């Protein structure tokens, strides 16, 4: 073992690959973040050649920005709700699809399909489904569930609900696959022993499956939250942030500030805020869920 | 403070290598290569742009024009992205001049040339200078109506006063007809009734209201604005718009109205291009009624292309822009497809060889007659244009006011957005 490690340490190819990875990470992640942090201290306008240093005034302005508060509130609510729903659904689907036959393997592929589709395509498809007099309305009216078509994207509350449902549908593909992988790593002997001890289905799920899924859940929940906190494409196509900005995520608000209001500096400050919020939430949730893993 | 822009430098270098640079001189035949930002709509097709560019190129020897097509009809946003990446075009079609002129990015036209060729030379002037030739104009909005549905509700004449308008709406509703179509699913379309009422009531009484808002002399929360917005709320509360109007997309709203589902439609005069030719005489138009029945025309003078102040060949760019702007052939598509009202001096509609409907001619008469013209609220391209970002806030407020009675709150938000955008 020691000899193998020493050999790897001396391998120049591995060093080059590591350097390339670090270089790319620095170029495409670290440098843009640092540039954004610098711009957040300026009043940069894309139309003007010069920008002035304004210190922390952009950050002070955020405290009085009601549109930012609305968009951040919507984003956090959406992220929390969708993460819970998508992960609960993911665990359910994973348990249903945890078989080895060909038909179940095909169904797994289908379950993952929403995650593979581009957010823009998902948005367009669901816009047709949820349109007034769209497919969903036709189905619900023909089944007698509703009397007249519902404007799913036309009222603030229903539009927000629709964005949540579509986002959860997309994320469920991902959470299903992650939880399925975690399920398959649980030793069968545990279930056999539990059955010998007379444990029922619910007890086996509660005492074995759910706790043993913890590592997968940590990954799934964290990535779900991060995905939702930066959600842009689906909302842009589905509602454009409307009606009346009721579905405007913080990412959408940043784009509006930068490219409509011409406020690169302030948009960068809001982007930094979103980055910090995302980091804090991701680290907190990861720490919380890892503690659960340790308790196993 | 001097900014270093390595990304922009790299992009510019890459573009130079691929031959996509703005206004390069020394092309294949030693002429100028200009870039021209355009946009496409169902009536302004790729063929229209290619033909019109080729025609203008012939009139300006030594110029080749590379067309850039904006990915959506929002030319301003795309032009800003091009500017941010160092690719600001030499020529930009139908952008909002104030946004770019403030930043010194546009070159004004020679005022003598503008005066000599256009009916309203200063119709879209910004701070006394013309950055886009005032080639055409729009009324935003008109109230289009379906004569058959009016007859069904026993309405003989279109209304002139606000009280008559409310009475017409009530009669239509009683006759089982949805009075007013609203494409509330698209923000700009949702704002049309409010644009009409504010233009008629607020700008009709004080044409300088928008300039005074810049000076801080008036506010959205002032009583006259509240009263105007109150009229819109009355229309909503009385059920004069269709159910679930915020879910109706702009394109669907056109279909709903032209297929006889609703009796009236408050929309920009570009709707004239969508009036069905086979039963065009079923449609008429009037202006948003005022309290006393006086006529107020919410007017917006648009135009053709702006010239970049950064272009390397301003003489050729100007020559191309002027040739394009004076070519009557270019107006045919704008008039027939976009319902644009031509503003060239010394020309009648017949000179453009167009086939237009009676409702177009009736609407055009509002432009050519002497009457009270005010800037269309939120649509002006002159000194009355709103600051960057305010249009979106106005559209959002229009949608919010459809479902919320919080007039004070929404108007206070608009004041806050205005103050933030102009500080």
Image: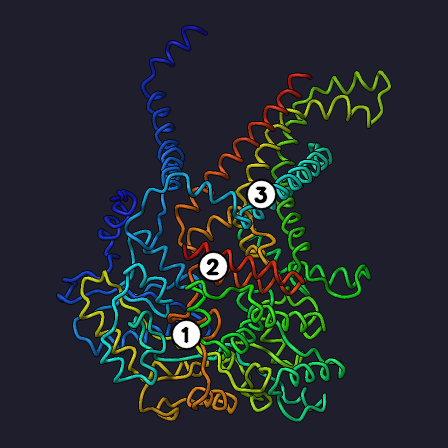
Q: Position of residue A280 (x, y in %)?
A: 54, 30
Q: Which mark is residue B44?
A: 1
The residue mark sitting in front, 1 or 2, is: 2
Residue at image x 61%, y 54%? A246
Residue at image x 51%, y 64%? B219
Q: Position of residue A184 (x, y in %)?
A: 66, 26
- Asked if badges 1 and 3 are on one and the same chain, I answer no
The outermost residue toward the top is A2
- Asked if badges 1 and 2 are on one and the same chain, I answer yes
For mark 3, what is the residue? Answer: A115
Mark 3 residue crowding within 10 angstroms, few (<14) / some (14–19) / many (20+): some
| SS at mark 1 in the image | loop
Spatial distance from mark 1 to mark 3, Cα to Cα?
A: 37 Å
Residue at image x 66%, y 93%? B156
| SS at mark 2 in the image | helix
Foreground residue, B230 or A222? B230
């Amino acid at each position: 073992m020691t000899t193998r490690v020493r050999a790897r340490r001396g391998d120049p190819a591995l060093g080059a690959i590591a350097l390339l990875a670090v270089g790319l990470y620095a170029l495409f992640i670290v440098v843009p973040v640092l540039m954004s942090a610098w711009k957040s201290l300026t009043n940069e306008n894309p139309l003007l050649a010069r920008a002035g240093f304004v210190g922390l005034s952009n950050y002070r302005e955020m405290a009085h920005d009601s549109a930012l508060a609305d968009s951040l509130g919507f984003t956090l609510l959406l992220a929390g709700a969708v993460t819970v729903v998508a992960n609960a659904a993911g665990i359910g689907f994973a348990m249903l699809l945890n078989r080895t036959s060909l038909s179940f393997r095909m169904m797994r592929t289908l379950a993952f399909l929403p995650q593979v589709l581009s957010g823009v395509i998902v948005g367009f498809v669901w816009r047709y489904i949820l349109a007034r007099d769209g497919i969903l309305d036709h189905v619900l009216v023909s089944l007698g569930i509703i009397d007249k078509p519902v404007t799913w994207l036309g009222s603030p509350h229903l539009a927000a609900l629709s964005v949540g449902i579509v986002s959860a549908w997309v994320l469920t593909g991902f959470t299903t696959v992650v939880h399925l992988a975690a399920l398959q790593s649980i030793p069968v002997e545990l279930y056999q022993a539990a059955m010998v001890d007379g444990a029922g289905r619910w007890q086996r799920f509660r005492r074995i499956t759910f706790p043993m899924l913890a590592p997968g859940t940590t990954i799934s929940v964290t990535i779900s939250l991060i995905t939702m906190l930066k959600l842009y494409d689906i909302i842009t196509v589905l509602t454009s942030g409307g009606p009346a900005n009721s579905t405007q995520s913080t990412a959408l608000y940043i784009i509006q500030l930068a490219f409509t209001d011409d406020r690169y500096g302030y948009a960068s400050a809001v982007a930094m805020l979103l980055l910090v919020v995302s980091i804090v939430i991701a680290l907190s949730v990861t720490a919380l869920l890892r503690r659960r893993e340790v308790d196993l | 403070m001097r900014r270093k822009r390595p990304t922009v430098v790299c992009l510019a270098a890459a573009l130079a290598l691929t031959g996509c640079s703005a206004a390069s001189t020394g092309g294949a035949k030693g002429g100028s290569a200009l870039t021209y930002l355009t946009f496409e709509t169902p009536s302004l097709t790729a063929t229209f742009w290619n033909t019109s560019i080729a025609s203008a190129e012939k009139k300006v020897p030594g110029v080749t024009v590379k067309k850039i097509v904006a990915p959506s009809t929002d030319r301003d946003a795309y032009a800003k992205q091009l500017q941010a990446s160092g690719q600001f075009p030499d020529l930009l079609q139908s952008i909002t001049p104030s946004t770019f002129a403030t930043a010194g990015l546009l070159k004004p036209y020679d005022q003598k040339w503008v005066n000599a060729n256009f009916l309203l030379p200063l119709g879209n002037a910004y701070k006394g200078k013309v950055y886009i030739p005032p080639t055409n104009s729009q009324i935003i909005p008109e109230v289009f109506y379906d004569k058959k549905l009016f007859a069904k509700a026993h309405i003989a004449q279109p209304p002139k006063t606000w009280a008559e308008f409310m009475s017409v709406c009530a009669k239509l509703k009683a006759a089982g007809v949805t009075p007013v179509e609203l494409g509330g699913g698209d923000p700009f379309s949702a704002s049309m009734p409010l644009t009409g009422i504010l233009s008629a009531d607020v700008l009709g009484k004080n044409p300088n209201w928008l300039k005074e808002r810049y000076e801080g002399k008036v506010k959205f929360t002032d009583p006259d604005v509240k009263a105007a917005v109150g009229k819109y709320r009355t229309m909503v509360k009385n059920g004069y718009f269709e159910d679930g109007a915020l879910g109706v997309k702009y394109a669907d709203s056109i279909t709903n109205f032209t297929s006889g589902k609703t009796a009236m439609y408050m929309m920009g005069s570009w709707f004239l291009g969508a009036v069905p030719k086979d039963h065009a005489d079923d449609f008429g138009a009037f202006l948003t009624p005022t309290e006393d029945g006086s006529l107020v025309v919410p007017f917006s003078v648009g135009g053709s292309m702006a010239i970049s102040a950064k272009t390397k060949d301003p003489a050729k760019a100007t020559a191309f822009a002027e040739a394009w702007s004076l070519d009557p052939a270019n107006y045919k598509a704008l008039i027939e497809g976009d319902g644009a009202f031509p503003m060239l001096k010394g020309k009648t509609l017949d000179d453009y060889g167009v086939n237009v409907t009676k409702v177009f001619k009736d609407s055009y008469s509002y432009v050519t007659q002497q009457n009270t013209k005010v800037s269309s609220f939120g649509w002006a391209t002159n000194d009355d244009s709103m600051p960057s970002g305010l249009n979106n806030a106005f559209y959002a407020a229009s949608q919010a006011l459809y479902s919320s009675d919080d007039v004070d709150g929404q108007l206070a938000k608009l004041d806050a957005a205005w103050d933030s955008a102009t500080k």
